[in-house]
Image (cartoon, helix red, strand yellow):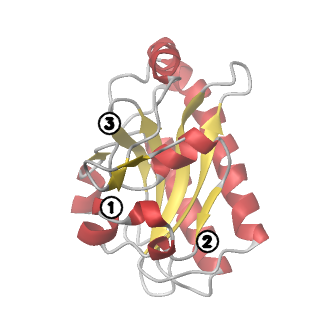
C-alpha cells in the first residue's frame, strides 16, 4: 500500500515486491525488450471500442501496459473517430509508449491486484500531481491487473483512459477483467508466433 510522504507532500508509490519475478517471467516469455506487439494493439483497439459502445460513444484510449522499471504500452489503441471507433490509422501516439511509474494509475492497479475504477480521477487523493491527469487531460480511468494464472505474477494491466468523467458500471468492470485475462493469454502465446510490429 502507498503512504503519504510529509516531505514531498505526495503519496509514495506502492513497493513492487513482484518486480524481480515479473522481470524473470517476461524474460522467459521473450517480452523483456519493450517492443510493441501487433496483437496487443488490436486488443487495445477492441477494448477502447467496446468501452466506447458501453459509454454512449465517448472516446477512450485502450492500453495493454507491461510494468517493469517503467510502464511500457505493448498494446496501444489507435485514435478514435467520431462515434468512438478505431480509425485504423497509425498515429504519433503509437510511438509514445513509455511512461514513468510515478504517472497514471496502473501501478496502483498492479498493487491492488483488483480492477481499479476511477469515475473521476480528481476524486482520488493520490491523483494530485499525477502527470497523466495534467499533461494528458485524463479525467477517467478503468483498469484490471493481468495476472498469470500459472504463476500468480501480475505482468501489468489492461486499462482505458478518457478525457470525460465516466460513471463505470459493472459491465465495464467485467469487460476490463476479461480483456486483462485475454492480454495474459496473448502474452504467453507470443513467443511461438512473435508477431511484432
Closer to the N terminus: mark 1 or mark 3? 3
Query: Eyeballing the image, is 46 above or below 50?
Result: above
Q: Are marks 1 and 2 in contact (CB under 8 Å)?
A: no
Q: CA distance from mark 3 to mark 2?
A: 26 Å
Mark 1 to mark 2 CA distance (whole Å) = 23 Å
Q: Is residue 32 visible?
A: yes
Residue 18 rendering spot, x and y as whole percentages: 53, 23
Q: Is 137 displayed left or right of 189 in the figure? A: left
Residue 43 position within the rendered picture, expressed as x and y whole percent measured from the top left = 55, 52
C-beta proximity under 8 Å, tags 3 and 2: no
| Residue under label 3 | 70
Q: Residue at x 54, y 66 (%)?
A: 48
Graded by Cα atoms within 10 Å as few (under 14), some (14 to 19) or many (20 or more), the crowding at tag 3 reads some
- Real-space Cα distance between discs 1 and 3? 15 Å
Q: Earlier in the sequence, mark 1 or mark 2?
A: 2
Front position in the image: 100 or 1: 1
Number of dots carrying numbers: 3
Q: Nearer the viewer, mark 3 or mark 2?
A: 3
Secondary structure, mark 2, is helix
Q: Position of residue 90 (x, y in %)?
A: 30, 61
**Front position in the image: 112 or 66:** 112
In the rendered view, would you say 3 is above or below 47?
above
Using residue 66 as the reference point, say whether residue 110 is left or right of it. right
Label 1 neighbour load within 10 Å: few <14, some 14-19, many 20+: some
Q: Assign the N terminus to one quadrant of the image.
A: top right
- Nearest-to-viewer mark from 1 and 3: 1
The residue tagged 1 is 130
User: In the figure, residue 186 lies in which quadrant?
Assistant: top right
Q: Residue at horizontal 46%, vertical 16%? A: 20
**Secondary structure under the numbered disc 1 in the rendered image:** loop
Q: Which residue is mark 2?
A: 51
Amino acid at each position: 500500500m502507498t503512504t503519504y510522504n510529509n516531505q514531498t507532500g505526495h503519496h509514495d508509490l506502492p513497493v513492487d515486491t513482484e518486480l524481480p519475478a515479473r522481470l524473470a517471467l517476461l524474460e522467459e516469455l521473450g517480452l523483456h525488450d519493450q517492443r510493441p506487439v501487433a496483437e496487443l494493439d488490436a486488443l487495445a483497439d477492441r477494448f477502447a471500442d467496446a468501452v466506447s459502445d458501453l459509454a454512449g460513444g465517448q472516446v477512450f484510449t485502450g492500453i495493454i501496459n507491461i510494468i517493469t522499471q517503467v510502464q511500457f504500452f505493448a498494446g496501444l489503441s489507435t485514435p478514435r473517430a467520431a462515434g468512438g471507433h478505431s480509425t485504423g490509422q497509425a498515429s504519433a501516439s503509437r510511438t509514445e509508449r513509455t511512461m514513468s511509474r510515478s504517472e497514471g494509475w496502473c501501478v496502483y492497479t498492479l498493487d491492488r491486484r483488483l480492477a481499479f475504477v476511477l469515475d473521476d480521477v480528481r476524486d482520488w487523493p493520490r491523483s494530485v500531481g499525477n502527470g497523466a491527469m495534467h499533461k494528458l487531460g485524463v479525467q477517467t480511468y478503468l483498469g484490471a491487473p493481468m495476472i498469470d494464472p500459472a504463476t500468480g505474477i501480475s505482468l501489468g494491466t489492461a486499462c482505458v483512459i478518457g478525457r470525460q468523467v465516466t460513471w463505470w458500471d459493472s459491465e465495464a468492470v467485467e469487460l476490463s477483467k476479461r480483456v486483462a485475462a485475454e492480454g495474459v493469454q496473448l502474452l504467453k502465446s507470443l513467443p511461438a508466433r512473435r508477431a511484432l510490429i
